[in-house]
Image (spheres, rainbow, N blue to C red):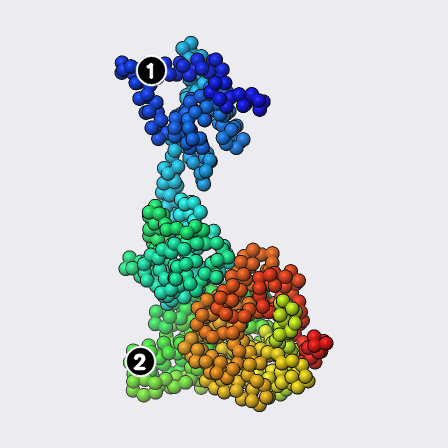
Amino acid sequence: MHETSARRWESAEALTAETRRFVAATEAMMASTAYHLSEDVENLRLKAIIHELPDFLYVKDRDSRFVFANAVTASNLGFRSVEEITGKRDFDLFDFEVARRHFDIEQQIMASGEARIDMEEAVVLPGSPRPVCRLTSKIPLRNGSGEIVGLIGVSRDITERKLQEDLHREQAKLLEMIACNEPLPMILEALVLMIEAQLIGIDGSVLLLDSEGTRLYHGAAPNLPGGYSRLIDGVTIGPKVGSCGTAAWRGQTVIVEDVMSDPLWEDFRALVAPFGFRSCWSTPIATSENNVLGTFALYSREVRRPTEHEMKLVALATHIAGIAIERKRVDDRIHFMAHHDDLTGLPNRAFLKERLANILNQARRNNRKVTVAYIDLDNFKDVNDGRGHAAGDEVLKEIATRMANSVRASDMVVRLGGDEFLVVLVHQSSHDAGISRRLRELQKAINRPMRGESGDIAITASIGVAAFPVDGATAEELLANADSAMYRAKQLGRNTLQHHDGAGTSVGMPLGEHEELHLAITGDQLFLEYQPQVDVATGRITGIEALVRWNHPAKGRVPPINFIPLAEETGLIVPLGLWVLNEACRQARAWQDTGVAPLTIAVNVSAKQFADPDFASHVAEALERHGLQSHWLELEVTESVVMQDAERALAMMASLRALGVRLSIDDFGSGYSSLAALKTFPFDRLKMDRSLVEALPGDKTAVAIVSAVISLAQTLKLSVLAEGVETDAQMHFLRHARCEEAQGYRFSRPVSPEEILRLLQTQLR
């Protein structure tokens, strides 16, 4: 229809004569139902009833234009009075596709004369944040001659009913998932999505409390920003740890109307601000005995309290989540009991059968070696017979603990039964010379005297060794050959170690990696390279990090990734770290003696160094020996170093700060990062890990995380350095985000002391 024609229909006076006759006929029809009252009184009463109806009621003409609508219809369609809707069509009210669909149905009704009853429609009404679901009936309207002159429509809002139906349906699905033992993350994600579907502008989150009851870890948050979820993953609960950390601590619901003003969020505002959340309501997920399992939280970008309806949904969610989490814990316990030894807690034969085949398959693909050690305790029967089975059980538990503590996390210790054990050493290179050393250390751990109620107990073991793929290509072959070697060790007098080679000769003991690294530290094979740290705003060098390298006499240059883990495992990291500390202090002083301006020299500190009670004394001695002022030395420690023993770490850091040494937290953002560490420990600087920086600036999640970290650090009065900066785009973003310092290939690779001096002299000129 032309625009000028459409305008004519905007007024009731513009209706055609046919339409006016239709209205009069409709009113006459209505009047015929009166209870013999006067026509005026009855019309007023009838109109009042129609306008008070909660349902939509309207009349349209043959062109699907509104001739009449009750008050509910007019107000829900955005009109202040019923008169304003007269002459309007759906094309004036809805988008074209929706209006076209309604128009086609109505024209078909009026053309065929057949009513459409109880049609379900989803309509977006003006000002409504979500589609409204309506149950609509449309009936053809005839005049006195039986001609169809329009239609009557009646619609009822069934949105709430549909939401309830959806809720009940999703509840049934969730319970089915729990009954079918679906993975817990899938169940929790479906639960959060179910609750979010019932609400508008709300994001949900489930955090799970760890077995120690101290930290909350990610459970499900399908629509929370990934960066925010990663930042709060692993947060320590407490009396003032946002909404979730506090709710888990109290065991009670915590409602925060405004995270920007509530004291519970004081330490976390800088973290949450970039994501726009303003209110957070958290409820503990608990067992039937009220033991906290985690939290269920709802986030809103509005400052407000939750409604009664929202809290009812939270109660439903926490109930279902509690069922799911408890079911998972029971299943885990059953699985653990089926695959682990009751006495020692070690994996059993069933677990070994499942795992060893997979371990060998991975080793085959990666050209790695796997070694199995079959261990039988010597004369264990004498312990049982002489001291009783209770003492024998204690011996077995102690031996199991010692063996578990003597291997890496990637290795496996299995109790085969009785006094027989199996150790599987995995993830070795095909030429790993350190295997002999590790087996000797394992044997020493077993042989240490054990204190009993009636005196010390001496335990020895016969050990048979077989290696994949030389001594067997399958798990069965390896176990059989290791068992054979173990019996050979028994025959040779017990307390010996035999390697299967077809003849049963004893293990050879070649020079191991431990000895090679020890020679490197004492034999002048180590050297340092240095990487500049620059001011983001000016590009000037502000500090230098010392990085250790190994020049092997036969293998050439060995990268740190190949010897630092070995040094940490063997304890050589302490003398190695002491060498690095002294060499870095010496070089820093040497640069100063050339006349260049003093710069901070940064040195990495390992966990074993930091745990050494004499470490602060070593630092003081190195500074004094080389004449370096303490404020030019910065010690970098990772979060895991200080979190292992927080009380001891605080004492050590206090001693170092008393010397005047600067402290920085290194690799912040790699994996788990604790916000509590930043607040608890007296750091001067935060070094963002390269894993955060490398995705900048294209990754929105990385941008949000880095911005939050910088803001948080500045709030805590910490300077910030970004590691791994390689591009101009990364540099531009960091400058815009007000990051103070940066380090990476964008400025310089790690270089020799001479090259550093050249860079400093060039900068001076």
Q: Nearer the viewer, residue 322 or 27?
A: 27
Q: Position of residue 439 (x, y in %)?
A: 50, 80
Q: Nearer the viewer, residue 154 or 431?
A: 154
* Mark 1–mark 2 distance (CA, rounded to whole Å): 101 Å
- Identified at 53% across, 58% down, the residue is 704
Q: Nearer the viewer, residue 549 or 484?
A: 549
> Considering the numbered disc 2 on the image, is that residue within a helix, a strand or a loop?
helix
Categorize mark 1 by other alpha carbons within 10 Å: few (<14), some (14-19), many (20+): some
Residue 647 seen in this snapshot: yes
- Identified at 29% across, 78% down, the residue is 390
Q: Nearer the viewer, residue 18 or 486?
A: 18
Q: Considering only vertical position in the picture, is 213 above or below 466?
A: above
> Considering the numbered disc 1 on the image, is that residue within a helix, a strand or a loop?
helix
- Identified at 65% across, 65% down, the residue is 726
Q: Position of residue 44 (x, y in %)?
A: 32, 21
Q: Which mark, residue 721?
A: none
Which residue is under mark 1?
A: 31
Q: Position of residue 119 (x, y in %)?
A: 42, 29
Q: Which mark, residue 391?
A: 2
- Quarter that holds the C terminus: bottom right
Residue 403 seen in this snapshot: no
Q: Position of residue 239 (x, y in %)?
A: 36, 65
Tag 2: residue type?
Ala
* Residue sitting farthest toward the top: 145
Categorize mark 2 by other alpha carbons within 10 Å: few (<14), some (14-19), many (20+): some
